[in-house]
């Protein structure tokens, strides 16, 4: 499981965008977003670097 801090994530729209981006890259990914903590936990076949790239391309670069 990988955890990322996403300082730019601030609302429900952000939560949906992050989830959709991760699921788009790996449809089997397990995604748990904690909006208040601005974190996302991802269980995926993709590497940490690949997941970070997906998040960055979606507009939510990990800190």
Image: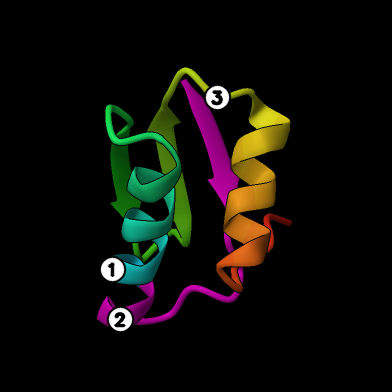
Tell me the residue at 27%/27% (across/down).
28
Q: Are marks 3 and 1 in contact (CB under 8 Å)?
A: no
Instruction: Calculate the distance from the C-alpha at mark 1 to the C-alpha at mark 2.
Output: 5 Å
Q: Residues within 10 Å of mark 1 (few under 14, many from 20)?
A: few
What residue is disc 2 on? 13
The tag on residue 16 is: 1
- On screen, 34 above or below 48? below
Q: Residues within 10 Å of mark 3 (few under 14, many from 20)?
A: some
Any magenta on residue 49? Answer: no
- On screen, 16 above or below 44? below
Q: Are marks 1 and 2 in contact (CB under 8 Å)?
A: yes
Q: Residues within 10 Å of mark 2 (few under 14, many from 20)?
A: few
User: The residue tagged with tag 1: helix, strand or loop?
Assistant: helix
Tell me the residue at 66%/36% (across/down).
50
Q: Are marks 3 and 2 in contact (CB under 8 Å)?
A: no
- On screen, 61 above or below 24? below
Residue 44 figure quarter: top left
Locate residue 23 relative to residue 63 in the image: left or right: left
Locate residue 56 relative to residue 43 in the image: left or right: right
Any magenta on residue 9? Answer: yes
Q: Which residues are magenta?
A: 1-14
User: The residue tagged with tag 2: helix, strand or loop?
Assistant: helix
What residue is disc 3 on? 46
Tell me the residue at 26%/78% (across/down).
12
**Which mark lies nearer to you, 3 or 1?**
3
Residue 13 figure quarter: bottom left
User: The residue tagged with tag 3: helix, strand or loop?
Assistant: loop
């Amino acid at each position: 499981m990988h955890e990322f801090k996403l300082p730019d994530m601030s609302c429900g729209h952000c939560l949906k965008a992050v989830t959709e981006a991760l699921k788009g890259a790996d449809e089997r990914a397990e995604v748990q977003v904690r909006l208040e903590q601005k974190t996302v936990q991802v269980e995926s076949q993709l590497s940490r670097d690949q997941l970070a790239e997906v998040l960055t391309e979606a507009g939510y670069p990990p800190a």
